[in-house]
Image: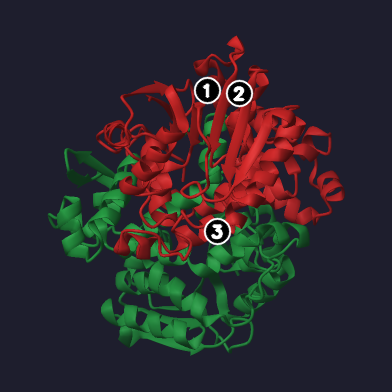
Chain colours: A green, B red
């Protein structure tokens, strides 16, 4: 049965392919865990040589690589496998654009468990898991996030820093809330040598952010405030507050509560920068932003992907005078800029 | 990020979509478990009315149905959902072509567990599970198969009965090995009122086959021989032996061992009918047959999707004089006919 596209109508083939779509995730995960793509990039290109290089069974490697060829992550000529163009760019660890680590968060056992109880979540209207209240610490989940998801941030962080005018070098105080890997604040600091970043997250997550700040050479302008974003003292007089991929975990009242704290921490004229999946009013487009709502149903008590109108209302209630929406080129997320 | 097709080259979008492809399986599974497609077919077409009908939370239903709209299993106009054409045909339980039950086997916890240990299976060259020797009974797995997978057999069973010339009404004795739901043998019996079927499978699986034989009105010509296909007494003088979806669980030596038993059970000139996923010699086409090899790596000790040359050799070694290959129109499986 052939695959169909998201833009053509579903067929029995597409129904069958969806029933077994989890196999594709697991095959890609196995290939990444065994670092098959990097091994092929390094010249091991038959089942025999790949088995030798990865320490896996030849039979296992042959079957996995044939499957990856069917799914067009590899090509095969005789007994020799090659990387498809985008596998070379995005799954080979030697590539600067490698996204391979993302699978450790996106297809983590935590995420698979949440989705494995999706029927119960739909019945209940919120996650069936014990870890759905994200005002509470689930540090193992977020350390995994911080260690896995940094690659995706590169184009987005560059876009944000550009939108803010970081290279103009004004002396900024930037609050980075739920910093995670820290890459958004760190990228601002890299472009603006006069920016100082204050990062908030759970303690063990901030360890990852500090490592990244050190690697990026901005550790001397990087400080942390460990704890809950709903409780820790932010300080005040910030030029910018970054709230990236955070609001979607909570209901609107909780989002407003956080945004009031952000408002208080900003100086007059300061701006809150929100990075989010923002579906259109129809809630079924654009595809990635709209589909993200299900991830929140599966994994949170009350989180959702909110529309721009919903954010505008929440941020207005929290005291912000104006919020504008900005599309990040070729990325599924959007940026909201809110002025105090 | 937009989906791409199996025939275009992979992109970062496709890599991302594959990393989260398991979410599509779980969303479809939840919708089937809650019978959302049938509820919409019956006229409940808003989140409010669907929640009332399915007993699920309105918020949960809204988010799930929006996701199913993004994935084009539904359409949405205002607040009203409708079934996409093929959801109406294949996911609504009132449709005679409904395939919905298949998800209970294809995405069973057993199958997900097998694939969840795929890296270990690749390392080892065979399943990492305890249930990989399919000469041993795993009756819960195969009762689930028998209860879930019958819908897929309809066009294939009709094709097989046609290929055999069942409607000619010759007095046949037909051995159905690893009968499962029994639908292949039952379909032969429906078309040929002079055919008697002898079904072999584990005892609790044969209970399902007998139920289906009774529903189809052929129970009086349907007898069973419970036990292992490698040990139970088949009897002899059969005109046909059906071996459907069975060889792929075993290594070639075990397949030959079974086929020698089949040979002994057939009368001179009798035929073995094998239904299988048969990849081409390149082992990466056609897509569904080639991809099936990974399902066997994940779930069996030594099983595989074998090529026609491999089957020809095994069946020749088992004593068959000639084996021919027949493509089933619009289906991913193929039929092999072997003459004694």
Residue of label 1 = B160
Q: Are labels 1 and 3 assigned to the same chain?
A: yes
Name the chain under label 2: B
- In the drawing, what numbered circle is on residue B110? 3
Circle 1 chain: B
The residue wearing badge 2 is: B188
Q: Is residue B72 left or right of residue A143?
A: right
Q: Do the numbered discs 1 and 3 sit on residues whose CB atoms are within 8 Å? A: no
Q: Is residue A95 left or right of residue A288?
A: left
User: Are labels 2 and 3 assigned to the same chain?
Assistant: yes
> Looking at the picture, how far across and down is residue A329, in whole percent?
41, 48
Chain containing mark 3: B
Could you confirm whether marks 2 and 1 are on the same chain?
yes
Question: Where is residue B139 shown, x and y percent of the image?
Answer: 60, 55
Residue B116 - label: none
Left or right side of A206 for B27: right
Q: Quadrant of the C terminus of chain B?
A: top left
Using the numbered discs, state the Cα–Cα distance from disc 2 to disc 3 in whole angstroms. Answer: 31 Å
State whether residue A99 appears in this view. no
Q: Residue at left 52%, top 40%?
A: B234
In the image, B85 versus B246, the foreground residue is B246
Earlier-in-chain disc, 2 versus 1:
1
Residue A121 horizontal/vertical position (percent): 71, 61
Decide which of A11, B256 is in the foreground and name it.
Answer: B256
**Within 10 Å of the Cα at label 1, are there few (<14), some (14-19), or many (20+) other Cα atoms?**
many
Sequence-wise, the earlier of marks 2 and 3 is 3
Of residues A263 and A111, which is closer to you in this image?
A111
Work out whether B68 lies above or below B41.
below
């Amino acid at each position: 049965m052939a695959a169909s596209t998201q833009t053509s109508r579903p067929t029995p083939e597409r129904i069958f392919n969806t029933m077994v779509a989890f196999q594709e995730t697991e095959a890609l995960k196995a290939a990444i865990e065994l670092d098959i793509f990097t091994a092929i990039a390094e010249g091991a290109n038959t089942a025999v040589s790949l088995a030798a290089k990865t320490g896996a069974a030849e039979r296992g490697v042959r079957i996995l690589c044939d499957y990856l060829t069917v799914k067009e992550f590899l090509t095969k000529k005789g007994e020799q496998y090659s990387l498809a163009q985008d596998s070379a760019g995005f799954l080979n660890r030697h590539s600067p654009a490698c996204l391979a680590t993302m699978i450790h968060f996106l297809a983590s056992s935590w995420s698979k468990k949440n989705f494995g109880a999706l029927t119960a979540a739909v019945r209940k209207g919120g996650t069936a898991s014990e870890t759905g209240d994200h005002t509470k610490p689930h540090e193992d989940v977020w350390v995994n996030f911080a260690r896995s998801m940094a690659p995706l941030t590169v184009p987005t962080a560059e876009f944000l820093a550009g939108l803010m005018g970081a290279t103009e070098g004004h002396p900024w105080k930037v609050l980075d809330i739920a910093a995670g890997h820290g890459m958004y604040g760190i990228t601002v600091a890299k472009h603006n040598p006069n920016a100082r970043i204050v990062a908030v997250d759970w303690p063990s997550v901030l360890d990852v952010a500090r490592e990244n700040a050190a690697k990026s050479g901005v550790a001397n302008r990087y400080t942390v405030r460990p704890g809950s974003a709903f409780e820790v003292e932010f300080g005040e007089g910030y030029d910018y507050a970054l709230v990236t991929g955070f609001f979607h975990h909570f209901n609107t009242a909780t989002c407003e509560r956080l945004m009031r704290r952000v408002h208080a921490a900003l100086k007059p004229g300061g701006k809150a920068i929100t990075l989010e999946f923002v579906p259109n009013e129809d809630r079924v487009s654009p595809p990635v932003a709209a589909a993200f709502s299900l991830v929140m149903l599966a994994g949170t008590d009350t989180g959702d992907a909110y529309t721009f109108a919903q954010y505008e209302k929440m941020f207005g209630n929290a005291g912000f005078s104006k919020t504008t929406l900005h599309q990040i080129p070729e990325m599924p997320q959007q940026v909201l800029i809110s002025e105090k």
